[in-house]
Amino acid sequence: MLKVQTLNNISVQGLNRLPRELYEVASDIAQPDAVLVRSADMHKMEIPASIKAIGRAGAGTNNIPVAAMSKRGVPVFNAPGANANAVKELVLAGMLLAARNIGPALDFVRKLDGDDKALHEAVEAGKKKFVGFELPGRSLGVIGLGAIGVKLANAAVELGMDVWGFDPAMTVNNAWKLDARVRQALSVDDLMARSQFVSVHVPLIDATRGLINADRLKLMKKQGVVLNFARAGIVDEAAMIEALNSGTMHAYVCDFPSNALKGHPRVVATPHLGASTGEAEDNCAVMVADQIRDFLEAGNVRNSVNFPEAVMPLLPGKTRLAIVNENVPNMVGQISTVLAKAELNIADLLNKSRGDLAYTLVDLDSGLPESAVQALSAIKGVLTVRVIAG
């Protein structure tokens, strides 16, 4: 029986992907094989030695000690794209809110008093302050063309916008999905200079912290709007507020309120609603549960943030070895030598690497003795050895 610990409320749709005849699933469980998590901060907890995998029911993994897990040979899975439609729709809503000055207009109406006649007169007199603009013909720059960025860019094209994209690490799969009318910017600066709206869809890492700064805000077209539904630190908040106050920028729409932003008339700040739809939560939970199950039962790796993609069909009657090791020369040769000494025949083998880690799947025609497992584990640089029956 495999044990899976849940650190947050995980969608039932996802938990149902783990059959109860094979899995024990609970929030309080001893020596779990895997963890399913949403927002819980795993940096603050002691992660048991029994853990073989961690699954984040969402895209970001800032709440998981990924580097520490890599050193232990533990893959961290996420659910890229599962919440893409939810975020795309919220960004589109944010564009409309900013273009039509909906936030200040709602505040204006809420503060009206008097009878209906007085209210009507105030509305007619005050509405001129909230004149906005329409989206067709306006330019949108999308930084980061992953699942969300591609959906947003395609939707904006259909709205009649002039769309530019920039992503030096764009995958071939996402490139196939991108509308041919989306044009390629040569750099972030190039994109900023071409855009009235800019939406960021990149992870928060050292290279992207403060990506949207004072200098880049000055490059944008007049009445510029920045939309940030990725991570707060990607936009330099102080620079943004200064640009809003000076009139350089028209609006800032984000999913990360702060005391500095709260109440600013040109800021629309939502309470981290990007993936907060029932559909997105279900999609994320289902995706990550399937990935955890495929790894535990077959050793396959899909959508890991720290392991290479490694998928090999597990045939009935074979015994599979799943080996995690440091990415150093001659590791496959040493593994093969140990198996040859144990007179074990290799039916299939897959070796993949990513950064400092390498991952090897080996299918054998027969079972292997414990002595062979010990010999594999003793190879310098091997982090984990797991035996999976076919």
Image (cartoon, grey):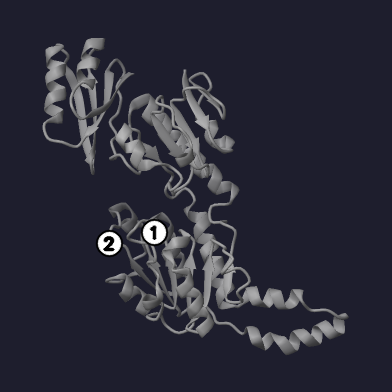
The percent coordinates of residue 191 (x first, y second) are: 34, 73
Q: Which residue is mark 2?
A: 168
Instruction: Name the residue rendered at 32%, 42% in the picture.
Output: 306
Q: Which residue is mark 1?
A: 202
Q: Is residue 259 above or below residue 32?
A: below
Callout 1, which amino acid? Answer: Val
Instruction: Name the residue rendered at 55%, 42% in the picture.
Output: 282
Is residue 160 visible in this depiction of the protein?
A: no
Judged left or right of residue 360, residue 212 is right
Q: How many marks?
A: 2
Q: Residues within 10 Å of mark 1 (few under 14, many from 20)?
A: many
Q: Earlier in the sequence, mark 1 or mark 2?
A: 2
Asked which quadrant contains residue 151, the reply is bottom left
The percent coordinates of residue 217 (x first, y second) are: 41, 77
Asked which quadrant contains residue 383, the reply is top left
The percent coordinates of residue 283 (x first, y second) are: 51, 44
